[in-house]
Image (cartoon, rainbow, N blue to C red):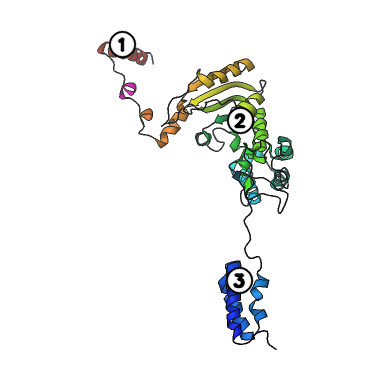
């Protein structure tokens, strides 16, 4: 005995097809199965899609935090960056075990509460990735990252933190763990406002203090003189995790460069506002320092992208001195004397 008559079968099959469409949103599979059911003559076969695909709609995981989730393919990104750095970017650091570096990095936060990861959790990673900073090439900065890396030229001119192996591996990435699945949260990660001991914040804290401790010789500090919230912010990474770790026995001088944006206002300069606070701190710590507004070499680099801006144009009077006939006679006389002596 068949489960339904030939008269009812099409109606029931259409009903089953409609139920499956509402349930899964996939009508083609249900139509094919329903057609097969009609041919085989069984309602049970017609309703088979409801049993085979009962959970075809998977609800999206809800974001727990306000920040972005873990960068996709994080392992491949870290390993790729590691090999690129030691083989192409800076082979002078010597051989590094990139697999061990990845494992130490991952173990600091995987399957962990993303608000309970501290600086100490990265100690093994730091030890495996560590290399020296060439004397006179350390460059600290706040609020002008793009300008800093343009000037440093991937470690050829200067070596800011982001161009060491440690900084190179973590730059512009996001990561955090959770207690389920693969141990990584790909949906969301906590911001610093939500918790300070999150994996990214703790990583940059220990990276910054390690970098400062290794810096030697004449060091440079590039700050933005056009920002309205403080050229030397008292709660910045430089103020809290780099400046306190500079070693008096290794650093001979600190050169401060206050760079205004080409299109920006001149809010702060050497000896004013928060810059004056930085200078006072350096004096108290016994560091010799200099301060320059719109340091010429960096300013020239800024003008590459804005050559017609008034700040980048040389005045004709500056390039061609306006000398009086009296001055010209004196200049010719001394020129003749030097020529005669030679």
Looking at the image, the residue that sits furthest to the bottom is: 1
At which x and y percent is residue 52? Answer: 67, 72
At which x and y percent is residue 130? Answer: 69, 37
Question: Within 10 Å of the Cα at label 1, are there few (<14), some (14-19), or many (20+) other Cα atoms?
Answer: few
State which quarter of the image contains the C terminus. top left
Which residue is more in the foreground, 305 or 40? 40
Q: Is residue 47 left or right of residue 154?
A: right
Q: Is residue 210 left or right of residue 289?
A: right
Q: Is residue 317 magenta?
A: yes
The residue labelled by disc 3 is 20
User: SS of the residue at dot 3?
Assistant: helix
Task: Determine the residue positioned at 45% across, 26% down.
Answer: 296
At which x and y percent is residue 7? Answer: 59, 86
The residue labelled by disc 1 is 330
Sequence-first tag of 2 and 1: 2
Q: Is 303 above or below relative to 16?
A: above
Question: Within 10 Å of the Cα at label 3, are there few (<14), some (14-19), or many (20+) other Cα atoms?
Answer: many
In the rendered image, is residue 215 in sight?
Answer: no
Which residue is more in the foreground, 331 or 114? 114
Question: Within 10 Å of the Cα at label 2, are there few (<14), some (14-19), or many (20+) other Cα atoms?
Answer: some
Q: Is residue 278 magenta?
A: no
At which x and y percent is residue 215? Answer: 64, 28
The residue labelled by disc 2 is 237
* Image: magenta residue range: 314-324
Sequence-first tag of 2 and 3: 3
Marks 3 and 1 close (CB-CB < 8 Å): no
Task: Determine the CA span between mark 3 and mark 1.
Answer: 101 Å
- Magenta stretch prevailing secondary structure: loop
In the rendered image, is residue 37 in sight?
Answer: yes
State which quarter of the image contains the N terminus. bottom right
């Amino acid at each position: 005995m068949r489960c339904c008559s030939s008269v009812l079968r099409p109606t029931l099959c259409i009903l089953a097809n409609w139920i499956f469409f509402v349930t899964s949103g996939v009508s083609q599979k249900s139509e094919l199965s329903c057609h097969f059911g009609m041919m085989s003559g069984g309602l049970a076969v017609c309703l088979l899609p409801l049993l085979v695909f009962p959970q075809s709609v998977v609800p999206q995981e809800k974001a727990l935090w306000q920040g972005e989730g873990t960068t996709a393919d994080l392992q491949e990104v870290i390993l790729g960056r590691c090999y690129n750095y030691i083989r192409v970017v800076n082979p002078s650091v010597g051989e590094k075990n990139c697999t061990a570096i990845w494992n130490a990095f991952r173990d600091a936060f995987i399957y962990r509460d993303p608000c309970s990861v501290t600086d100490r959790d990265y100690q093994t990673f730091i030890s495996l990735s560590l290399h020296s900073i060439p004397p006179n090439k350390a460059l600290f900065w706040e609020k002008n990252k793009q300008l800093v890396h343009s000037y440093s030229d991937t470690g050829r001119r200067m070596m800011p933190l982001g161009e060491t192996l440690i900084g190179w591996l973590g730059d512009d990435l996001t990561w955090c763990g959770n207690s389920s699945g693969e141990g990584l949260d790909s949906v969301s990660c906590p911001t610093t406002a939500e918790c300070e001991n999150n994996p990214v914040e703790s990583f940059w804290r220990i990276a910054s203090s390690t970098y400062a401790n290794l810096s030697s010789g004449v060091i440079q500090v590039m700050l933005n003189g056009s920002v309205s919230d403080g050229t030397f912010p008292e709660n910045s990474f430089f103020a809290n995790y780099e400046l306190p770790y500079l070693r008096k026995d290794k650093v001979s001088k600190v050169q401060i460069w206050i760079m205004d944006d080409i299109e920006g206002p001149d809010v702060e300069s050497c000896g004013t506002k928060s810059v004056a606070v930085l200078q006072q701190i350096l004096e108290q710590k016994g560091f010799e320092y200099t301060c320059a507004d719109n340091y010429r070499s960096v300013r020239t680099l800024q003008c590459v992208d804005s050559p017609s801006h008034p700040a980048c144009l040389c005045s004709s009077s500056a390039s061609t001195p306006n000398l009086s006939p009296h001055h010209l006679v004196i200049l010719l006389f001394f020129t003749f004397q030097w020529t005669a002596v030679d």
